[in-house]
Every structure is written in structure tokens, then in C-alpha cells.
Amino acid sequence: NMFPQIIPSSELCHVFYIIENAGKKIICHQTLKSGKPLTPVAIDYIKYDPVYAPYSVANTSGRIFLLYTALTDEQETPGYKIYDKSTSKWSKLIPLTKPGQALYSPFISSCDDRVLITYVKKYEDATYIITRSLSNTDGSPLAEQETLRCTDPDIFPKLLMLPNENIIHWREDRQVKYVSFFNSAKNPSLRTLEFADRNPSLDFNVIANINQKLVQGWLVPGNFSNGLTLGFIQIPEPSGASRTPAPYLHETKSSSSYFALSDEYKVFERMQGKIADLEKKIRQLSDRISALEKNR
């Protein structure tokens, strides 16, 4: 399985991962009760890119939102599905665009039961970061709202999830820009970190309280259980000479978090052996996958 993500809760842990079947990638959902994995569910065929996170999830008190790019008849459709915790059922795919239309760097996030989708749209004259809220009642997408115009056509925004806000940040030339739409949705305040060096090659530096082997590229930045410090550093010289990290973008210390908790990852590590024993059950998913194809 690939790209696991975990949403912990008091009763159930929700685990998402990708498996391969007949050369195609499938996003799966599995729950853990008292540390024991229950039967996995195949959600949909998914566009897979090993460089970028192929999906993202947002957790609220009653629902889980899964954002990904579905593959149907070789067409790509960016959209999301909603998991109802009371019925344990997934909705149909809710598309964000028409099939074949591209959205760049889409991801979904939540704060105080509000759900927000952020993505990039590229036009001939400009590139925009666009946010789109979801309805609190039925989870349907609302109209595109706050937008930020960017000078760099090749921006790739990322998300830093904190207990009380979510910060969207990206790099343009020698600057790192960041903004929180949740705290001031009507008038988001854009902030900038400036680097004196003209070398635009910047990278992320993360100091976290979990096993560094678990901090993978697709996972960073994230929210870690006892705090996270995120900084931006210049890529080391070819000679291997070390460089001093630039000023930190944000630092938080919190006893609670929603994503990438070390305890839950210990559970997930134990799951790896159990998942191997579930290979026979996973093969049985082929019948369900065939049913999915017929119902499309």
C-alpha cells in the first residue's frame, strides 16, 4: 500500500491508502477498532503521481471529506467524496470541474468544522490561488471565493495544519508567502518572508517530535502532536557545506493535533504485518471493483 494517512478518533481510527490492481491505482478506506483492522473498502480509481500527494482528507465532527482526481475512461475528474460517520457510507463523487479540466495542486482542509478546498488555476495572463468553501449542511461546493494573484506561473501551494488555523504557503522567487483563509476569510492577510540571497533554490526544514523516518515528502508540512517548527533553508552547496536555516515561518506547541500523531503511526506500523495477512481479502475487492465499473 502507498501514501497512508490516518485520522484518529476516540473509537475508530480511519486509515486511507492506495493499492494497485491490474495496473491501476485505487484509493482505499479502512477503519481500526481497538487497534484491529476491519474490512477495507475500495473507494475509486485515482490519479497517481509519486511526486505529489495524490489525495487529501478533511475531518469534521460528523463527516470525512476525501479530495482526489478520479480516473474514469482515461479521463481525469478532480472532485471529492463524503463519508458519513453515522451511516459509515460514502457519497458519489462530487466533481469540481468538468471531466478533462485540470486543477493544479488541489487539497482540502478543515478548521472548526468548516471545510475549505484550495487549488491553483492558470490563465494566459496570471495564476491564481483559489479557495472554495463547502456547505455546512450537505457538503456541496459553494462558489469560488477568495483569490490571490501570483506572479509566478509555476507555484505549488502547501498546507500547514495547526490546532486553530490552517496556513497556506508557497514560494515566489526569493519570497515565501503565506496566508490563513480560515481566520479572516473575507480579507485574508498576505504575509511574506524575504531571502537576501538571490539563489531561488529554497527547501523546507522541519523539526518534529516523531520518528524522522515517518516524515515523508508528501506528508510535509503537517501537524505534529507536541509541536512543529517549519523553516525554509537554501539547498546545500554541492560541496556539502552546511547553511544556516532562514527565519522560521511558524512554530506551534500543542498537546493535541489531528494529523500525523506518533501514537497512531505506531499503530499503523503494527498494521503493516496484519495487512500482509489481509492480502486474500484485498483480492476479493476485485469483485467490488468490477461492480464499481458497472455502476459508473
Image (cartoon, rainbow, N blue to C red):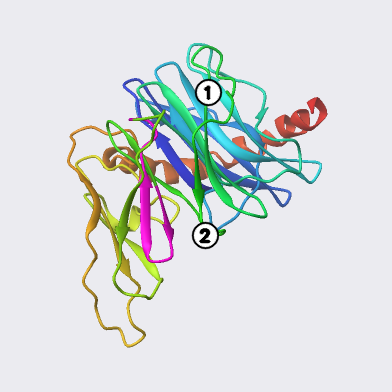
Residue picked out by circle 1 = 134
Left or right of 242 in this view: 40: right
Q: Give the amino acid at mark 2.
A: Asp
Residue 194 falls within the magenta-colored stretch: no
Badge nearest the viewer, 1 or 2:
2
Q: Quadrant of residue 113?
A: top left
**How far across and how far down the image is residue 57, in percent?**
48, 34
Q: Classify mark 2: residues with Cα within 10 Å, few (<14), some (14-19) or many (20+).
A: few
Residue 243 vertical placement versus 50 (above, below): below
**How far across and how far down the image is residue 8, in percent?**
35, 30
Name the outermost residue toward the bottom.
239
Residue 166 vertical placement versus 232 (above, below): above
Q: Which mark is residue 248?
A: none
Q: Residue at x 37, y 30 (%)?
A: 182
Residue picked out by circle 2 = 152
**Alpha carbon separation for disc pair 1 and 2:** 28 Å
Q: Which of 8/113 is in front?
A: 113
Residue 175 falls within the magenta-colored stretch: yes
Left or right of 87 in this view: 206: left
Q: Give the amino acid at mark 1.
A: Leu
Q: Which of 139/188 is in front?
A: 188
Characterize the magenta stretch by its predominant secondary structure: strand
Q: Could one spot residue 221 in this view of the protein?
A: no
Magenta region: which residues?
169-183
